[in-house]
Amino acid sequence: MAVTKQTKLFTHIMFLVAAGLYYSCNSTQPLYTGGPIAQGISQPEFITRSLFDAKDRTISEEDIQRLLDGRIKLQDTLRVAIFKYSSSSINRYYTNWWTDEEYLKTQQSFVDTLTQAIGNSARVRKVFPVPSLMTSTNPNMTQLRETAVRLQADILIVYAISSDIYYKYRMFQKNQAKAFATCETILLDTRTGVIPHSSVVTKEALIVKDEQDLNDMETRKKAEREAILSALIDTGKAVSQFLNFK
């Protein structure tokens, strides 16, 4: 029986359809794995300048989205300025604390402790305090950022210390003083005004009165000083760890 032209055409069409189905079922399509080469997936924007308006200290809706979706890149080597936002309550034990040698040495030990802990980061080239004469009594974030710019600091660490003590009188035993100290810290990127890191660290210290303490006040001072130093050490470690992995 002769094969008609219509039969040959129908057979050819069916062959093409079957081949197309086979190819579509057995071929693999590339999947998006989050890599940078994926098309149509926008990468986070690097924030390279401040988006905060110093005039009215407001942020536009557009810049809010840019800040939330974006990211910042810190320098490979960093100059870090540190600023103590508020004085600790330890000065209550000193009558003329602004001229008392012991008080001044204690305050310097606080600065040295935080400076050393932050300086342990491999990326930190220099750590230096912000002189009080460069700021007002209650500076805002804009003023602090401008101060850091004048000092050519890549990062500004702003910290505040609060503390309190509890003294326990014990019959026929040595009295004890227990102190709590909290260190609140923010890390400000000078170039963008963004705060990529913050921490709140609370530590405690228990001191038993010994023969070297002239009175109960000496024991209280020692307890509060130990609690503050412990909080500053942990704060510095947290900042150093953040800088190492940022």
Image (cartoon, grey):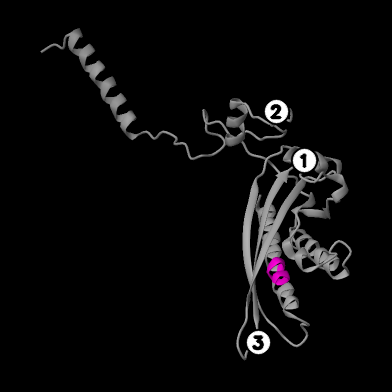
Q: Residue at x 71, y 72 (%)?
A: 226
The image position of residue 241, as x and y in percent, is: 67, 58
Mark 2 burial class by Cα count in 10 Å: few <14, some 14-19, many 20+: few
Q: Amino acid at mark 3?
A: Lys
The image position of residue 120, as x and y in percent, is: 75, 61
Which quadrant of the structure image shows residue 54?
Answer: top right
Residue reaching furthest top?
Answer: 5
Q: CA distance from mark 2 to mark 3?
A: 57 Å
Please tell me which of labels 1 and 2 falls first in the chain: 2
Residue reaching furthest left?
Answer: 1
Front residue of 158/67: it is 158
**Which secondary structure, mark 2?**
loop
Quadrant (top left, top right, bottom left, bottom right) of the N terminus: top left
The image position of residue 170, as x and y in percent, is: 61, 85
The image position of residue 3, as x and y in percent, is: 16, 12
Q: Nearer the viewer, mark 2 or mark 3?
A: 3
Q: Nearer the viewer, mark 1 or mark 2?
A: 2
Q: Which residue is mark 3?
A: 174
**Which secondary structure, mark 3?**
loop
Q: Nearer the viewer, mark 1 or mark 3?
A: 3
Image marks 1 and 2: residues in contact by CB distance under 8 Å: no
Region rendered in magenta? 224-229
Please tell me which of labels 2 and 3 falls first in the chain: 2
Q: Which residue is mark 1?
A: 145
Q: Amino acid at mark 2?
A: Asp
Q: Which residue is mark 2?
A: 56
Q: CA distance from mark 1 to mark 2?
A: 16 Å
